[in-house]
Image (cartoon, rainbow, N blue to C red):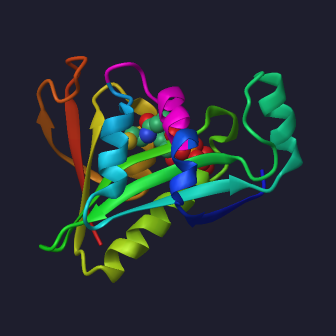
Amino acid sequence: VDYTLRDFQPTDFEELWRIDQECFPPGIAYSKADLTAYVRAQGAFTVVVETTSSRFQTLRQADDTQASSVGAIVGFIVAEANKRGSGHIVTIDVLRDVRRSGIGSNLLIAAEGRLRLANCDHVRLETAVDNAAALRFYERHGYAVTRTIRGYYSNGVDALVLVKEL
Ligand SMILES: CC(C)(COP(=O)(O)OP(=O)(O)OC[C@H]1O[C@@H](n2cnc3c(N)ncnc32)[C@H](O)[C@@H]1OP(=O)(O)O)[C@@H](O)C(=O)NCCC(=O)NCCS
């Protein structure tokens, strides 16, 4: 899959929300209101991945979705830098069809670079205790579990808090 990273534009919003619905189970996926608030929050930034590959066109048609072909968004990351030097990964979403090809890693590396530029010396995130793929992914990127938050998600699932020094 060929792809490029670029900054979020407001016209991307519906596509991002659909991707988030596809990536997370009910109770963990964001409502439109929540996702809007996170994208617009002070200190927040969103990076999207756009495919430049015609192979993806075939995959999407097979899925019978309405996504456009070349230029379709296949993943994104929302992160925020607060004034105290703490970065936060709000969410990272990569469509199933294009996982395990380095897109998530590139999004995470891009966000960590932006957080460093914003003077963050560490970054934290939450993920569901049963999200084995995400836990492997974050461990691979040097994140360590620091604690558990009971009932963090609206479906009652606990979250693990992971932290990385930048
Ligand atoms: C987690 C997620 C973002 C990873 O995206 P990705 O583009 O597949 O990640 P990469 O291809 O960069 O993977 C990098 C490494 O992470 C690890 N990893 C990623 N997915 C994995 C999986 N399903 N099982 C085991 N290890 C995995 C591997 O070490 C992988 O390297 P490898 O493919 O060479 O073995 C993606 O699976 C996703 O969007 N999941 C749904 C949403 C989600 O859970 N987000 C994270 C919680 S906020």
Residue 25 is covered by the magenta coloring: yes
Q: Is residue 68 left or right of residue 33?
A: right
Q: Position of residue 156 (x, y in %)?
A: 20, 18
x 54%, y 40%: residue = 14
Prevailing secondary structure class for the magenta stretch in the rendered image: helix
Q: Nearer the viewer, residue 136 or 70?
A: 70
x 65%, y 48%: residue = 73
x 50%, y 42%: residue = 93
Q: Position of residue 146 (x, y in %)?
A: 16, 48
Which quadrant would residue 30 be assigned to in this image?
top left
Q: Position of residue 162 (x, y in %)?
A: 24, 49
Which quadrant would residue 55 be assigned to in this image?
top right
Residue 70 is covered by the magenta coloring: no
Against 15, residue 144 (above or below) is below
Against 57, residue 79 (above or below) is below
x 54%, y 27%: residue = 22
In this rendering, does residue 33 appear at all? yes
Against 19, residue 74 (above or below) is below
Q: Nearer the viewer, residue 97 or 76?
A: 76
- Residue segment shown in magenta: 16-27
Q: Nearer the viewer, residue 17 or 149?
A: 17
Q: Position of residue 132 (x, y in %)?
A: 41, 31
